[in-house]
Each structure stands twice: as C-alpha cells, then as structure tokens.
Amino acid sequence: MVKICSILVLLVFMCPGITLAETYKWVDDRGTVNFTEDLSQVPKKYRKKVRTIGDVGPSDSAAGEPARDAKPMKGAETSPAAGSSSGENEQKKNKLYGGRSGGDWKSEFDSLKANIGATDNQIAELNARLSDTSRMSRTEYLSIQNSIKNLSFHRDEVNKKLAALNEAASRAGLPGEFR
C-alpha cells in the first residue's frame, strides 16, 4: 500500500502540465509587486487589485508574438525617464509600439522577470531542503528532486517567452526603458 502511494506521489510530480496555471499579480502597500499561481495566497485586501497574467504554459510568445492575455492593472504607472518631463513621459507611455502601449510592454516584461525570480526562489528553497537528507524519506527526496526538475523546466519556458517578447519589442521599436 505504501509503495502504491509513493508511486502515485511521484507520478503527480512528474506531470508538469498539472502544475502550470494562471499567474496573479498585485502590488502591496509598500509598492512591492507580488506574484502567485494560487489566488488564495493573495491577501484579501489586495484581491480587488489583483491582475491575471494568464496561463504560463505554451503560448503565442513561443512563436515570437507577445502574449495578449495580460490585463493592465488600474493605477499602474511607469517611472519618469531621467531627463524627460512628465508630459514627455506620458506621451511615451501612451505611444503605441507594435499596437501596444509602452506601459503594457513594461508590465509584461516585469511579469516575466518576476516569474523567473519567484521560480528561482522556489528552486533555492528546495535545494536548501536537500542539504540535509538525514531525516528525509527516499520518497520525499525523489519528490523534491522532481519538483526542482519541473521548476527548472518552467523557468526555461518563461525564459523563452522573455526572449520572444524581447525580440517582438525590438521589431516594434520599443525603447529600452520599457524592458
């Protein structure tokens, strides 16, 4: 019976498609941008401000097109560029690059970068757990290793999306301040 349960646990962790989901983004009172794939992890007072980024699985971004499912957050602003007036900054932010505003591009870049950072943090936490395996069962050890493998795969996919977005931004003539 224990062996069957162990096999089932391993199978669940070996299926990366099960763990892929929508990503939720919100900004807390201190201005920190937060991301999660579980809406229940968003504090209740920020749930009205949460923004759905979209599915982190394969998308049009892999084909060189930016993902179109990102919904802009109310009140999201970009910081003024050095040496430019706020009027010029507003014009730049509202100017369209490849059919999208600079703010939309920046938001998507920030989202992908934050997703990579969060994934790196999860991998680091799991690696830290593997540093002391003396009180760990073989099943738990293998499960953690599989989770690290799946997270690494996810990180590679998000890196591909970021590269595709960067390429699309270059084709659209997007200035570096929005990347």
Image: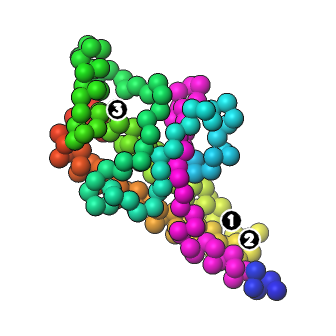
Mark 2: secondary structure: loop
166, above or below 95, in the image? below
**Residue 130 position within the rendered picture, expressed as x and y whole percent measured from the top left:** 63, 66
What x and y, as percent, mark residue 84? 24, 16
Image location of residue 178, percent across then percent down: 30, 34
Query: Which residue was labeled with disc 2?
Result: 136
Secondary structure category for the residue under label 1: loop
Report the residue at 82% width, 86% height from top.
1
Q: Is residue 132 left or right of residue 54?
A: right
Query: Residue 146, relative to residue 38: is it above or below?
Result: below
Judge by depth and name the residue closer to the eye, 60 or 37. 60
Q: Which residues are magenta?
A: 6-35
Please, what is the three-letter code of the amino acid marked with disc 1?
A: Asp
Residue 123 sits inside the magenta stretch: no
Of 141 and 13, which appears nearest the observer?
13
Q: Which residue is mark 1?
A: 132
Q: Amino acid type of disc 3?
A: Gly
Q: Quadrant of residue 8?
A: bottom right
Residue that mark 3 sits on: 103
Amino acid type, mark 2: Met
Quarter of the picture holding the C terminus: top left
> Marks 3 and 1: CB-CB under 8 Å?
no
What's the CA distance linking mark 3 and mark 1?
A: 45 Å
Q: State the SS at label 3.
A: helix
Judge whether residue 58 can be spotted in this image.
yes
Residue 138 in view here: no
